[in-house]
Image: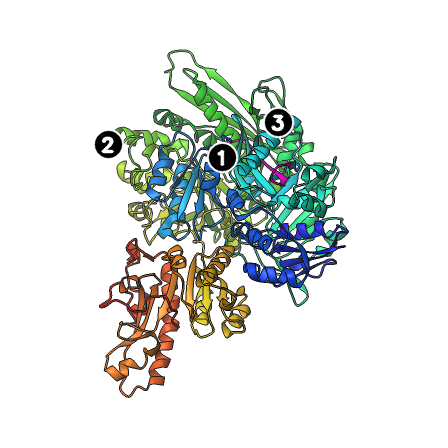
Amino acid sequence: MAERVLVIGSGGREHALAWKLAQSPHVKHVFVAPGNAGTADNGKISNSAVLVSNHTIVTQFCKDHNIGLVLVGPEALLAAGIVDDLRAAGVRCFGPSARAAQLASNSSSSKAFLDRHGIATARWKAFSNPQEACRFIISTDFPARVVRARGPAARKEVTIAASKEEACRAVQEIMQDRMFGEMVVIEELLQGEELSCSCFTDGVTVASMPPAQPHKRLLDGDQGPSTAGMGAYCPVPQVPEALLEQIRGAILQHVVDSMRQEGAAYVGVLQTGLMLTKEGVKILNFKCQFGDPQCQVILPLLKNDFYEVIQATIDGKLCSSMPAWSENRTAVCVVMASPGYPGDCDKGMEVTGLLQAKELGLQVFHGGTALKDGRVVTSGGRVLSVTAVKQDLMEALGEANRGVATIHFQGATFRRDIGHRGLRLLQQPLYVSTGPAQIHLPPTSAVKGSRSEGGGFAAFFDLKASGYDDPILVSQTKSLGPKLQVAQVCKRHDTIGQDLVALCVNDLLAQGAEPLFFLSQLACGKLDAEVMETIKEGIAEACRSAGCAFLGGEVTEVAAPCPSGHCDLAGFVVGAVERGQRLLGLQRADEGDVLLGLGSPGIPGRGFGVVRKILLASSLHCSSPAPGSCGDTTLGDVLLTPGKMFSPALLPVLRSGHVKGFAPTAEGLLGGISRVLPEHVSAVLDALSWKIPEIFCWLYKEGNLSAEEMAQTFPCGIGAVLVVQKDLAQHVLQDIQRQQEAWLIGKVVAPCYTGSHIEVENLAEALQLSSPQQLLNDTTAESQPQPRKRKVKVAVLVSGTGTTLPALISSAREPGSCAQLVLVISNKSGVEELRSAARAGIPTRVIDHKLYGSRSEFDSTIDRVLEEFSVELICLSGFMRVLSSPFLRKWKGKILNASPSLFPRIKDGNAHQEPLESGFKVSGCTVHFVLEEPGARAVIHREPVPPRPGDTEAALAERLREAELRAFPLGLQLVASGAVRLGARGATCWRRESQRLSPQEEQGHGSSSAAAPEPLEHGGLWAGP
């Protein structure tokens, strides 16, 4: 008898799960909750509005609709115990228990598990103190640059920092005021080839799936911010059977056996992220369900009935029903994302071309989509997963990219190089040594057509195989010079390879060329094998990022009298550009054009001659604490920060036709700009328009340099300059800012016949500003423009009696708001606030307190929903339920309420009556943190409302209501922006630079003082307005 199945989730993974299940003759219908546009009334598949965060309601839905099987997609629900609750109620459910799911949801717990059972992983340590975490990052002898957040409101993404300084900044952001995470896990950054290996398991037997390779970075060449996944392909070619068997037995089976031994049998799908390092296979992370987008390339290759495999897994009979996979078939998935992803995304944009993609034989899995008036529109970050299945990787890549080209929505973001690493592996496969768990990586070759011969410099490169029609070759050679000598003194060589590649590759961009292959040459007085290997690894990693092949390098030991520690490092890169795409540069800049600057914190090698002179005369040395670092970063670390490499992420912008010229500033700010200015024009820059890193301010002061000398010698925080027509400047700037820091820094003007060809205004003032980028103290000078901060996700709890929700919605829509309303929860159905939220496009949930046997059970359900939406702050707006102590402790410092009183003598419900009866001279409302022990010390903002002569209760009540509408949005903004937080002892703390009058105070409308004349009586178990 065919059964009904429920799939819980709304992404591309859930669409793929429903699509595969619907192919089974055992399945009558598949409900997807809440689903998306792709799962709405699609044959045997339809959406359901059942409240998936409420396990009791899901259980009742399953019984009412005769659901025979439930599949859970979101890991947060698995960790919250939905499988346990459904099974306890007699509902058949596929997935691990809450305890087993901790393997994926609790990073420190999973790391400890791996250590206990001797399973190789990155070195790590967990911290609840940001200072201790930063000291660990700085002091370790390995690259501790992976930062994971943990806590009730922790964000899911992982920060992979480019430097230890960036890792410290990530720690500060995550743990700032305990807003985004109660704990961080710091991990070693592993180098090698990354694979995703998954399996079905019934708790005893392991059935491996083909290995897949996801692409996490937003942009081509693994550039841009990290995402949940921009594409994947499966299987990964040329992975030896010996390696796959090692992964199955020594990792997957070992993990499953160890979980069973610890009393937490794992049943379901287990996915492992693996890094193939020189030391062997190491585990990066776990997922307790199919990954997204890995699911979209694995399930199309499954030959068995998916439903039957699931049933055998649940019944513990997987050994008798092992899945089979298509041979000689490859699946490629390209994700199309909304503009702004992985940050705030625009929604409601129409998606077209879906039918044409289907006609091409492609499967388009929906993620962030919705139906509006019969049209498919965007509703989230990752919108679509376009999947092609063909006989080989190259054919599948071409078909997937053709499918993407047929689909359109405004600002669509996608990668064009999904699977290119697989093409490299087809040229030079991985292979395993005879030793245990030893994996050797081939030379880096990210470009099809490259092949090394004879073990030396000679190499072949097939331009036709690289896809060029009429190419022009462009070459460049560079040397690091004195910067390498400073690296020798600091005994730090892990960044100089990146610097060298960046110097060479950025120069190719000036011609619009992309890099093809790179060679290096190192000469030194005495060879040091460890140093050589570190430099080589840095070059190889940088070449991977640039999308070019590293064909190798020559190392020469120079005879005496060369000092034993002296080294010289040079690089040679060859790139190509189609004849019609070459940038003309000097001939095109005209008066009225605009100059855009791209941020880069590094000091190029050319400037290190001056740096060395400053160090010799300075009281500081390379191991001294860096200026503004609070002792957790050395001066040498900051000086050796590598320059920014702009290729290949910038190539689409340069080739758009909107850019007239591009020049890197390795020769100094003035030297770089002069490369794009013809003689008939001049340029004026304003140094206050961009962020100058503190190290340049220190060099300026310590070296007693003039502003002109600084501009001639150093880039001063600008890594490259673009010339753009004025009316296109904002468009180009926005495109670049999606990938990195950039500013409008100047303009092209009429020629100046007296004085300099290029004038940099306010440079001395900008360099004199005290603007240390504190890693542990966010005290950035107000005059320095800062990158836009991510908005804090806010939920509002209502009961139908509040009035402030519309004001909160309106405030959050303001351009300067730091808050984003992502959820409204009501304990009563049909209330006006739910309709207001729906009109504003904000998701809503009804969690009826009458369905729960205890207050803690009710609060626990609310907590699960909040975590499902990654909520970071909670506002109570007329929420008439008492919150339990465990809930308040967990969300301490993250719950805000507005109470209609200023003094404890005025009860919440009589704020407009008692002042009149008692003769008080002032009434008002108070925005405060909600605590177990309420008090005046937790006040965020007060809005006084003095009674007027002849006031009636109704008149005063109306003015109090208006005060609440002003006060609550202001209080939310203060907390979301980080200006106000709750201190360790339950008192409000103000960030130093924020202790100034708010706009309301300047107009005399209120006071934001954290002090109070008397404690508040009703600080927070009951909601106010």
From the image, tell me which residue sits under label 2: 619
Residue toward you, 751 or 305: 305
Separation of disc 2 and disc 1 at Cα? Answer: 46 Å
**Mark closest to the chain's N terminus, 2 or 1:** 1
From the image, tell me which residue sits under label 3: 430
Indicate the position of residue 1002 as horizontal and vertical percent values.
29, 68
Whether pointer 1 and pointer 3 mark residues with C-beta atoms closer than 8 Å, the reply is no
Figure check: 1008 above or below 742: below
Q: In the rendered structure, which amino acid carries the disc numbered 1?
A: Leu
Indicate the position of residue 534 as horizontal and vertical percent values.
46, 25
- In this rendering, would 42 be left or right of 249? right
Q: Nearer the viewer, mark 2 or mark 1?
A: 1
Q: Secondary structure at mark 2?
A: loop
Q: Is residue 12 visible?
A: no
Q: In the rendered structure, which amino acid carries the disc numbered 2?
A: Ser
Please tell me how crowded label 1 is: few (under 14), some (14-19), or many (20+) other residues with Cα within 10 Å: some
Q: Secondary structure at mark 3?
A: loop
Magenta span covers which residues?
190-206
Residue toward you, 812 or 546: 812
**Mark closest to the chain's N terminus, 1 or 3:** 1
Residue toward you, 161 or 277: 277
From the image, tell me which residue sits under label 1: 114
